[in-house]
Image: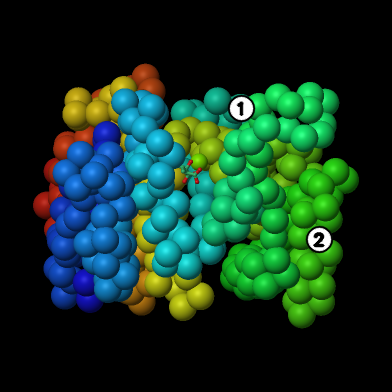
Amino acid sequence: MKIAILPGDGIGTEIVAQAVRVLHALELKIETETALVGGAAYEAHGHPLPDSTLQLARAADAILFGAVGDWKYDQLERALRPEQAILGLRKQLGLFANLRPALCYPQLTHASSLKPELVAGLDILIIRELTGDIYFGQPRGRRTAVDGHFPGADEAFDTMRYSRPEIERIAHVAFQAARKRSKKVTSVDKANVLETFQFWKDVVTEVHAQYPDVELQHMYVDNAAMQLVKAPKSFDVLVTGNMFGDILSDEAAMLTGSIGMLPSASLDRSNKGLYEPSHGSAPDIAGRDLANPLATILSVAMMLRYSLDQAAAADRIESAVQAVLTAGLRTADIWSQGTTKIGTRAMGDAVVAEITGKAITTKT
Ligand code: IPM
Ligand code: MG
């Protein structure tokens, strides 16, 4: 098995380094090869997703991705900005299904900005369509308006669109995931205003006919945003489009205490995947040994489970993370009174020590 390692920018390199140590600590027959992506690749090769990186990603059995982006690239033309690397990988590799679990660890209930009773035991799976919608819809661009409120003025536009097969395949992913959980899907749309999302709702409803054992609920995105902070435990599987999924997954992540804890998987039709933390490159804390590597470490667990058929190894990582949290070890983002604050590298050390059975139980 070969894993492409794409650390990227900002904290990406630090967190991926720890995740790779954890992967190697499992002593599986796994080969890794690292390549530049994002701003780092732009600096070295003049493009955020060089051909060599794309080829490596294509050839690999799975991809471990850190994060891309830095404000210093904001002035570059769009095609050269670091974000194009992740968007390009998703599109080129057909990674249409983005799984973002939002799990509230009992040890971290108090790190949430919501009352502990609202989030204790929270376990939501957000399934975000990842290669369509307004993110990729053509046409898009800038032009002079010929109509609208200000004819003759400069304007910018994007196109929101979804085709039937795009909606059908993500709906199947959601219903099948629900069958392995509590058999409840909430499809989030804006059917009251948008043609695209009335169609989304219609197609999801049609696909649902094949899953009579799963309960389907439709919810407008504004209400979903509200319900996520009002009664987050009322959700189980939440499926939505690319744009709404981007926004709601950050919201759901924060319910759990820190976005620094949340892994994600982006899968193609045959479960080949790219695995990355749900958070970004956080240039403000990069290089300071402050970032939480657990989202990336847990992304390795998802990779083992979904793409490499190594569920036992995935369990070992997840148990090790639990043990480290129980021992009271915390990076700054999840630290609270009475726990021990440690850095990125020490968090990696602690997880590796649990996996290799060399952990020194820390009492707090
Ligand atoms: C995410 C990120 C990306 C997105 C950015 C970096 C392009 O916010 O993975 O959620 O908008 O999809
Ligand atoms: Mg996002």
Q: Which residue is at a point 20% across and 39% down the rendered structure image?
A: 43
Give the labeled residue for mark 1: 115
Rendered image coloring scheme? rainbow
Q: Quadrant of the N terminus?
A: bottom left
Seen from the viewer's position, the closer of residues 81 and 186 is: 81
The numbered dot on residue 149 is none
Label 1's element? loop
Tell me if residue 166 can be seen.
Answer: yes
Where in the figure is residue 116, as x and y percent of width and height?
A: 58, 31
Percent of width and height locating residue 184: 72, 62
Q: What residue is pinned by disc 2?
A: 199
Q: Is the residue marked 1 within 8 Å of ligand 2, measured from its CB?
A: no
Rendering quarter of residue 118: top right
Badge 2: few (under 14), some or many (20 or more) residues near its Cα, within 10 Å?
some
> Eyeballing the image, is 199 above or below 290?
below
Q: Position of residue 272 (x, y in %)?
A: 40, 72
Task: Give above or below for 155 relative to 300.
Answer: above
Task: Identify the residue shown where x is 31% and y is 53%.
Answer: 49
Q: Secondary structure at mark 2?
A: helix
Q: Which residue is depicted at the point 79% across and 24% down?
A: 150
